[in-house]
Amino acid sequence: MLGEQGIVWLFAVMLGLYACGTLTVFVSAEKPRAANWLAHGFAFCGGVCGVAVALALLWQKSTLNLSLWPVAAGLNLSLRLDGLAAFFLLVISLLAAVVSIYAIGYVSEYYDKKSVPLLGGGLNLFLLSMALVVSVDNAFAFLLAWELMSLVSFGLVMFEHERDDVRTAGFIYVVMTHVATLFITLSFLALYLFTGTFAFSDFRTIAGAIPDWLRNLMFVMLLVGFGAKAGIVPLHIWLPRAHPAAPSHISALMSAVMLKTAVYGLLRMLFDVFGGGPAWWGLLVLLAGLVSAVLGIIYGLADNDMKRFLAYSSAENLGVIFVGIGAALLFQAYAYPELAALALAAALYHVLNHAFFKGLLFMAAGSVLYATHTRNINDLGGLIRRMPVTAALFLIGGLAMAALPPLNGFVSEWATFQALFQLSLTAPGFGVKLVGALTIAALGLAGVFAAGGLVKHFGTAFLAMPRSEKAAHASEVPFSMQAGMALLAVGCVVLGLFPGLVLRLLEDVCGLFFHTQLPQAAFFLLPVSGSADAGLLPGAAWIVLASLLGISGLILRQWLGRSRITVEETWTCGALLQPSMQYSGTSFSNPVLVILQRLVGTRREVDIHSHYPYYPRRIRHAVDTRYSIETLLYRPTVGFTVKLAHKIRVVQNGNLQSYLAYVVVALVLALLWMGQVKV
């Protein structure tokens, strides 16, 4: 077991490795292969060290405190890794190690095209900033690390800035991320006014003395700020643009890891600093998560771009996490610490599970892009014969995303359902019970749409016949890319079969906030009153079931003999089978989009070319999705802002005397304010 000194040194080595990897930006651009291996080698080693630090802290249930040096009077730079921070460091480090393996093969596509040292150095700085976000114990240092993470991720999104869509995505991303930072900063400044310090430890001691109205205002600002960074609907507008624009291994990190730093920040403030809140806090977080889960996956189902679909799916899964957090807040307000611990454990387990299957899916989508140079599933088809490994791994990730057993997505979503079942049974008011029941139904509907999205994208991209020359001539990706995806696929299976391994690590986190301990079978509690000790052993159950099915299959084969299978061509009324006869992504999702056209903003165009007397010669059908939230919320807001800016611009008249008058007025107002402060 690692002692405290060993953990400190290993943590310092992790930060040092990321810093050394960042310095690869200075490697000559004429040596892209060396820069590739060097940058991602540092990232891999840093990730391994981070995993060791996090596991040691979680397993030993210890906290690491480091006080480095004073920055200014009353402002010290300190680091603190308790159970919550260690868990999120574990998620960051696991994905850092796996993505760096995948990136070695993926980045080779940029040789002689883009700066590989710049991309590799940016990756390491991105990982360093995220590790600092979950490690610092000071609001000022948190904002610095948060801003560094935002700016570095913006640079990575803009890596292929020569494309118009990338520049647009980068602009929207940097605006939304700074809107989020503004709300978070205002909350921290309000706490600073009460404490006179930025230390989280002082925030904890004084938070109870803050007036209720200000606590409520800070809660709303924190929810907006961290919700925007997490991509919660309707603050998600940057998500389906930035993730597809970035290189695929960066997209995997942004979705699997960066979004979770917002979850960390929200948990740190709500449970650690504020110690919970009134029931309406939990209800608002739960409803925000519910809206994001349902609308996010509906919007994703409408899209034919693989990476945009996965980005919308991230909004859905972050919604599931927020539902768990909201349920935990509600249970804490109603004084049910065991159920609050169950809801929070479900949310945290989904944080880890989503990191695994969404990282896998983004890397699989990147492999398709690497092989075919397109993300549009309507231009693909037949890839299962040309990229069998990628197809199998994409299917595993998709099944986990759709929460199908025995994969990891099922376990955490089932635990979330368990918490909601308990909410609908034990909440003191009928209204909250009704909300719990409706949330169960809505999340079930979201799960159906997620499964439909998997069928649409896997079936259209990997099955049937190729629809383009790019798909027809595709080949399997390099081994390092396959290895990175395979590691996450194995994780999806292991985390689904043996959730107790993670539950053991979450005990410290739940005990930190609720001073209670989860039962060993907490993720599989029966949703009825008085069943605290009822549970299942999922790993053993699935192994027994698989063994029984295997034995039954062998017996049937021995008894009945081999199946007689005849393979024939698809019947097409005598016509020659053509790729155009297949279902496209648009035609697959069209029935759902027609039903939900007011919610989604779907517009259909049907162009009929008549030539024969009784039936048309050709019918052209197109579906245009104009997302309702953007049409009703963001476009009017942007239009109003532009008009207001034009009106304010009258002060910029080019007159020097006017500018001097502005300075004098501002100075007088500042002196008056300072005089009032002194009094």
Image: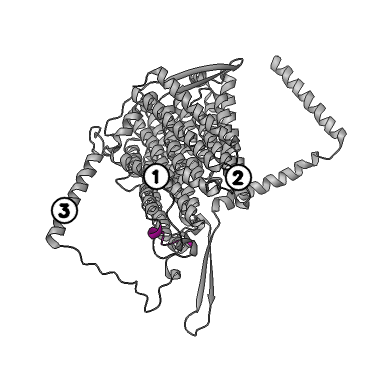
Secondary structure beneath dot 3 equals helix
Quadrant where the image shows the N terminus: top left
Query: Are the residues flagged by discs 2 and 3 in contact, CB closer than 8 Å?
Result: no
Query: Are the residues flagged by discs 2 and 1 in contact, CB closer than 8 Å?
Result: no
Mark positioned earlier in the residue sequence (2 or 3):
2
Residue 646 falls in image quadrant = top right
| Within-10-Å neighbours for mark 2: few <14, some 14–19, many 20+ | many
The residue singled out by tag 1 in the image is 483
Q: Is residue 228 visible?
A: no
Considering only vertical position in the picture, is 638 above or below 577?
above
Q: Nearer the viewer, residue 469 or 239?
A: 469
Q: Nearer the viewer, residue 578 or 429?
A: 578
Secondary structure beneath dot 2 equals helix
Secondary structure beneath dot 1 equals helix
Residue placed furthest toward the left: 559
The residue singled out by tag 2 in the image is 170
Q: Which residues are magenta?
A: 379-386
Tell me which residue sits at (45%, 70%) in the image. 580
Tell me which residue sits at (70%, 46%) in the image. 642
Q: Is residue 346 left or right of residue 173?
A: left
In percent of width and height, residue 662 lies at 81, 31
| Within-10-Å neighbours for mark 3: few <14, some 14–19, many 20+ | few
Measure the alpha-carbon separation of dots 2 and 1: 30 Å
In percent of width and height, residue 232 lies at 50, 42
Tell me which residue sits at (49%, 51%) in the image. 307
Q: Nearer the viewer, mark 2 or mark 1?
A: 1
The residue singled out by tag 3 in the image is 552
Amino acid on which the number 2 mark rests in the picture: Gly
Residue 69 falls in image quadrant = top right
Amino acid on which the number 1 mark rests in the picture: Ala
Mark positioned earlier in the residue sequence (1 or 3):
1
